[in-house]
């Protein structure tokens, strides 16, 4: 009986280790807008926002998994009570704010189509 328990524990351990190794080495799936988000940065677009801003979260949600590749600049101090110097130096007054290579700014949740038009980045057709 004791040997059976040891065998089962070993089998479970091997399976769990195998799953952990597989998850570690299998790359995360790409987001639908990865190339678009990377292009925005290449075209010198900047997305200023804060972690506590609901509109910023909605803007990121438009990009799904690809939001991690956005040219995002966090403007809030960790306590959420102040603005970081890099954003105050840029004159950022509301969130989200997009700034483009030509110096133009757009404030609020910007549709992906508008970002594509402004930057010349290709928006994938899904």
Image (cartoon, rainbow, N blue to C red):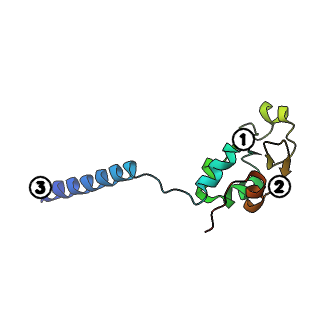
82 to the left or right of 61: right
Q: Which residue is mark 2?
A: 108
- Picture quarter with the N terminus: bottom left
Q: Nearer the viewer, residue 66 or 117?
A: 117
For the point 77% across and 57% down, which residue is it?
Answer: 117
Residue 84, visible in the rendered structure: no
Check residue 3 in the rendering and tell me which mark sits there, or answer none: 3
Q: Is residue 117 above or below residue 51?
A: below
Q: The C terminus is located in which quarter? A: bottom right
Q: Position of residue 114 (x, y in %)?
A: 78, 59
Q: How far from the left and from the top, in percent, is residue 100?
A: 79, 45
| Mark 2 closeness class: few <14, some 14–19, many ≥20 residues within 10 Å | some
Q: Which residue is mark 1?
A: 73
Q: Are marks 3 and 2 in contact (CB under 8 Å)?
A: no
| Precedes in sequence: disc 3 or disc 2 | 3
Q: Position of residue 53 (x, y in %)?
A: 77, 51
């Amino acid at each position: 009986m004791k040997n059976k328990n040891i065998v089962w524990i070993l089998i479970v351990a091997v399976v769990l280790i195998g799953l952990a190794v597989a998850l570690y080495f299998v790359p995360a799936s790409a987001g639908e807008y990865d190339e678009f988000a990377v292009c925005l940065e290449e075209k010198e677009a900047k997305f200023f926002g804060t972690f506590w801003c609901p509109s910023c979260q909605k803007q990121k949600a438009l990009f799904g998994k690809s939001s991690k590749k956005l040219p995002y600049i966090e403007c809030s101090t960790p306590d959420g009570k102040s603005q970081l110097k890099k954003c105050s130096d840029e004159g950022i007054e509301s969130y989200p704010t997009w700034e483009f290579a030509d110096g133009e700014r757009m404030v609020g949740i910007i549709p992906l189509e508008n970002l594509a038009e402004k930057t010349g980045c290709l928006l994938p057709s899904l």
